[in-house]
Image: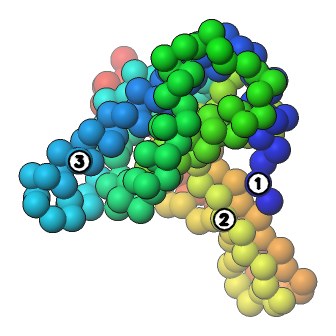
């Protein structure tokens, strides 16, 4: 079920939306430019490999932080027509930010659509400050498993090592053998590595 756009974004406020539109539009334009350059250089379908992205993330507008963002060109290739369409819808507000109205439902849908499309490309969340019911910006992993009977170890999300991001897992089991382990999220090791020696 899609998130209620008018509830999540309408609470953000016009000033934050102006900065958000500027950021989202700039990112989208840069992504389309890089995609075209790769396509033209290859003279065919551009390479699908991910590459690092330089993102000047406005922390005053968004909740959380992106973690080593990458452009996932396989995703960008799939959503490129939608990205172009949304850039077209947002362009008038980029040119005239004073026309941004936090109560304009069509604008909110366009901003949300552009934001979600960038999330697909970066594989990270972009959440405005003031939004409720949404994980903070950054890597986000979600998984769910539903089984009739557990014979051993069941997890909605299983991660060997997690250095950053938000994880949400859910496991539903009707019955389980004795000794079975059921967990929504299983993380073997969590936390950032440090290259600095201990003092």
**What is the distance, in whole Å, between disc 2 and disc 3 at their CAs?**
34 Å
Q: Is residue 79 left or right of residue 77?
A: right
Circles 2, 1 touching at the beta carbon (< 8 Å): no
Reading the image, the residue beneath label 2 is 143
119 above or below 184?
above
Tell me the tag on residue 2.
1
Q: Secondary structure at mark 2?
A: strand
Q: Secondary structure at mark 3?
A: helix
Q: Position of residue 156 (x, y in %)?
A: 69, 68
157 above or below 191?
below
Residue depicted at 70% across the width and 84% down the height: 152
Q: Secondary structure at mark 1?
A: loop
Q: Position of residue 135 (x, y in %)?
A: 69, 40
Tell me the tag on residue 36.
3
Residue depicted at 66% across the width and 65% down the height: 143
Circles 2, 3 touching at the beta carbon (< 8 Å): no
């Amino acid at each position: 079920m899609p998130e209620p756009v008018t509830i999540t974004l309408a609470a953000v406020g016009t000033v934050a939306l102006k900065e958000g539109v500027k950021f989202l539009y700039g990112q989208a334009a840069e992504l389309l430019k890089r995609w075209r350059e790769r396509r033209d250089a290859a003279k065919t379908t551009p390479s699908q490999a991910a590459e690092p992205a330089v993102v000047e993330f406005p922390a005053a507008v968004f909740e959380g932080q992106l973690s080593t963002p990458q452009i996932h060109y396989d995703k960008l290739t799939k959503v490129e027509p939608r990205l172009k369409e949304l850039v077209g819808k947002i362009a008038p507000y980029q040119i005239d930010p004073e026309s941004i109205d936090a109560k304009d439902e069509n604008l909110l849908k366009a901003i949300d659509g552009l934001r979600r499309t960038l999330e697909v490309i970066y594989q990270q969340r972009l959440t405005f400050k003031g939004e409720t019911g949404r994980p903070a910006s950054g890597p986000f992993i979600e998984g769910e498993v539903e089984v009739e009977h557990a014979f051993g170890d069941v997890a909605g999300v299983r991660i060997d090592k997690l250095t950053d991001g938000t994880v949400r897992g859910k496991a539903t089991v009707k019955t389980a053998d004795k000794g079975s382990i059921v967990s929504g999220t299983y993380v073997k090791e969590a936390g950032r590595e440090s290259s600095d020696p201990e003092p």
